[in-house]
Amino acid sequence: MAVTVSLINMKGGVGKTTLAAQLAHAADRQNIRTLVVDLDPQSNLSQAILSPEKYVKLLKDKKPTVSAIFESYLPPSNSSDSPKPVDIKDVIIKKAGYWADTTLDLIPSRLELSHTLKNPTSKERRLAKALSKISDQYDLILLDCAPTESILTEAAYHASRYALVPVKPEFMATIGLPLLARSINEFKYENNDHSLDICGIVFNHSSAYSEGPEGEKSIKEVKVEAKKNGWNIYNTHVRYSASYPKAAREGTPIGSTSYVRWEVTNEFSTFFDEFLKSIGLKTIP
Ligand SMILES: Nc1ncnc2c1ncn2[C@@H]1O[C@H](COP(=O)(O)OP(=O)(O)O)[C@@H](O)[C@H]1O
Ligand SMILES: [Mg+2]
């Protein structure tokens, strides 16, 4: 059975999508059978994995997306005029990764997912149920969440064993953390048969040199909050590098972007190893 991890922070722009994409590529490189699920109507992860061009083609071809899992029916397509019940296999894009021998699969998103947000009643377990049917075909499933708490967050909790929390060391970095703690605790209280833990907090967008007074202060505050809740903080910080947005634009792993500095690639791979350890996964030779 795959280990399922959600990337969550109630704050936007902290690197959830960036790290989800890069972790997926890193896992793929190491022959870890990985599925990434884009749970954000903004669909940035789908674009970062497929490249924006291929993503636009997917929309044009009316390929089903994660919405279909929540709505339980595939929308009418060219081949059939009436909606038909969804099979999760219909929404998976196979071999969506970068490497020639890729086994990275993707469940993409699209803006229509916001329909689920408007009509959320009793849909929160559908994703978990769908993923459980294919979980034995993967080692790792990564879910990229939208920042706002919604039915989609709850669906991610139901489907996940762990939550990975990226934090940007800046003013107000801690703002989403008490909310997250409360949200996870409430979920655990309501669903005491389900194990859900934070595997760790990772500082992203961090500086390779000094964080400066504001950065240092926010790191301290996050550490206090983490200690209070018993959360792990990864030793490796993921630094700011223009190669991350570039990799997202090109749909490539960070190490395959042109002019990337080896320290950046190296650092990410050290973080990746720490991450794997924290969720009890070993690399497969
Ligand atoms: N380590 C990093 N170095 C440089 N830019 C980054 C880094 N992490 C994220 N970014 C950029 O910051 C912006 C927000 O990141 P994103 O992953 O979309 O955050 P979230 O999914 O949490 O909203 C994006 O433009 C992304 O390319
Ligand atoms: Mg995002």
Image (cartoon, rainbow, N blue to C red):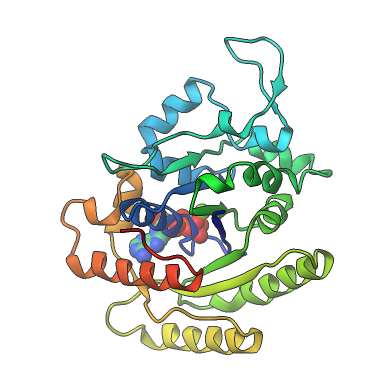
Name the image quarter holding residue 26: bottom left
Please state which of residues 66 and 166 is positioned toward the viewer in this rendering.
66
User: Please, is residue 246 above or below residue 277 in the view?
Assistant: above
Is residue 15 rendered to the left or right of residue 189? left
Residue 282 location (% of width, % of height): 41, 65
> In the displayed structure, does residue 278 sit left or right of residue 259?
right
Rendering coords of residue 65 (x, y %): 58, 33
Residue at 43% x, 40% y: name it: 47
Q: Residue at x 55, y 39 (%)?
A: 109
Q: Residue at x 45, y 56 (%)?
A: 20
Task: Please tell me how many numbered marks the rendered image carries.
Answer: 0
At 56% across and 47% down in the image, what residue appears? Answer: 136
- For residue 158, above or below residue 193: above
Residue 145, compared with residue 224, is above or below; it is above
Q: Quadrant of the N terminus?
A: bottom right
In the rendering, at what x and y percent does residue 59 appear? 50, 26
Q: Is residue 49 left or right of residue 12?
A: left
- Tell which of 138 and 109 is nearer to you: 138
- Residue located farthest toward the left when viewing the structure as drawn: 259
Image vertical order of residue 137 relative to residue 76, above or below: below
Camera-side residue of 166 and 66: 66
Q: Quadrant of residue 267 in the image?
A: bottom left
Which quadrant of the rendered structure holds the C terminus?
bottom left
In this image, 31 relative to 264: left or right?
Answer: right
- Residue 4: horizontal and vertical position, in percent? 57, 57
